Amino acid sequence: MTTTSVQPTPAPAPAGGEGHLLDVRDLHVEFRTREGVAKVINGVSYHLDAGETLAVLGESGSGKSVTAQAIMGILDMPPAVITSGEIRYRGEDLLGMPEGQRRQVRGKEISMIFQDALSALNPVFPVGWQIGETLREREGLSRAEARRRAVELMELVKIPAARQRVGDYPHQFSGGMRQRVMIAMSLALNPRILIADEPTTALDVTVQAQIMDLLSDLRRDLNMAMILITHDLGVVAGVADRIAVMYAGKIVEHADVRSLYRSPGHPYTKGLLESIPRLDQRGQQLATIKGLPPNLMRIPSGCPFHPRCPFAQPVCADVAPPEVALGDGRTSRCHFAEEVRDGRI
Ligand code: SF4
């Protein structure tokens, strides 16, 4: 395995259409609670092709993790209800699939790494046992075979002295090493798609970079596709091919990484980019996006971003912006997408 370098950004894959490895189409998800109905996903469409990395970016509550849970089939239903839409994996409709078949897809075809390794790992079992559990249950491996494979997986994710540490418990590992254990578990069945949900949130900056490098190397070396869910635009630059930016349950901008960093086409993306700390702006006040994400039980009319948008015009509060094509597969849901992209407003 080699160390990660910034990969050249390939041309964006075509939007929609047939033949994608994973295709989410016009997905709507509600959470029906005693307090009311929260419209958490409001028409999300994205796709993933073999070997690529899609970053799904947004603040808490934007719907990025809920979309991933719908793909994995692990949404808590109820209160969640998928009211419409499709999720296709290699052309097959995941939402219409019987649970037994769905379970075969989960882990073996599409696997997921969760945010918080400490709470996702069981404190009373050695990590090797936990990595091997899926192999014993799903592949019928013996305990010895599963342990041997667990050591191989721990070596794959670069846990030092894997053979000696396979019997250690989660609390004996650092936060970064625990996250590596989680990654090893997610790779046990050789998935084609890895969904990484905020994989570096609980880690310090140096360890974050190491984990991102590791994920990038693994994606390339194992020829997987990856969905990287994050709230931090800073972590995706050298890793993702495309970025889908989510706000209030919709994708508000979708672009290849280079175009999005160079000339964001949505004010929300622009605000996120401006709020990344930069070494050449030391001592200056960091830009922020004013206000808070909307209450999903009362999503603002028109453009849901209008109460926070520095460019909002009267039309924005009344008319929901359509998805505007910006060329090369880029899209933005803003009435003034071209002006924003070209820096004219
Ligand atoms: Fe801002 Fe209006 Fe564009 Fe929404 S549609 S992002 S409020 S300029």
Image: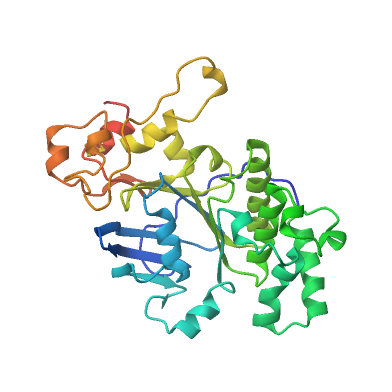
| 68 left or right of 250 in image | right
Q: Position of residue 221 (x, y in %)?
A: 69, 58
Q: Is residue 181 visible?
A: yes
Residue 233 on image: x %, y %: 49, 39
In this picture, residue 229 sits left or right of residue 315: right
- Vertical side of 139 occupied by 331: above or below: above
Q: Residue at x 70, y 59 (%)?
A: 181
Quarter holding residue 271: top left
| Figure colour scheme | rainbow
Q: In this image, 122 relative to 273: left or right?
A: right
Q: Nearer the viewer, residue 35 or 317?
A: 35
In this view, the residue in front, 258 or 287, is 287
Q: Residue at x 73, y 48 (%)?
A: 174
Q: Could you say which is closer to the camera, residue 260 or residue 295?
A: 295
Quarter of image, res 34: bottom left
Q: How many marks?
A: 0
- In the rendered image, the vertical position of residue 17 relative to residue 318, given as above or below: below
Task: Out of 258 and 75, give the one closest to the viewer.
Answer: 75
Could you tell whether 136 is left or right of 11 in the image?
right
Residue 335 in percent (x, y) is at: 21, 40
The spot of residue 345 in percent (x, y) is: 26, 26
Tell me which image quadrant ligand 1 sits in: top left
- Above or below 135: residue 185: above
Classify the position of the N terminus by image quarter: bottom right
Q: Is residue 20 visible?
A: no
Outermost residue on the top side: it is 283
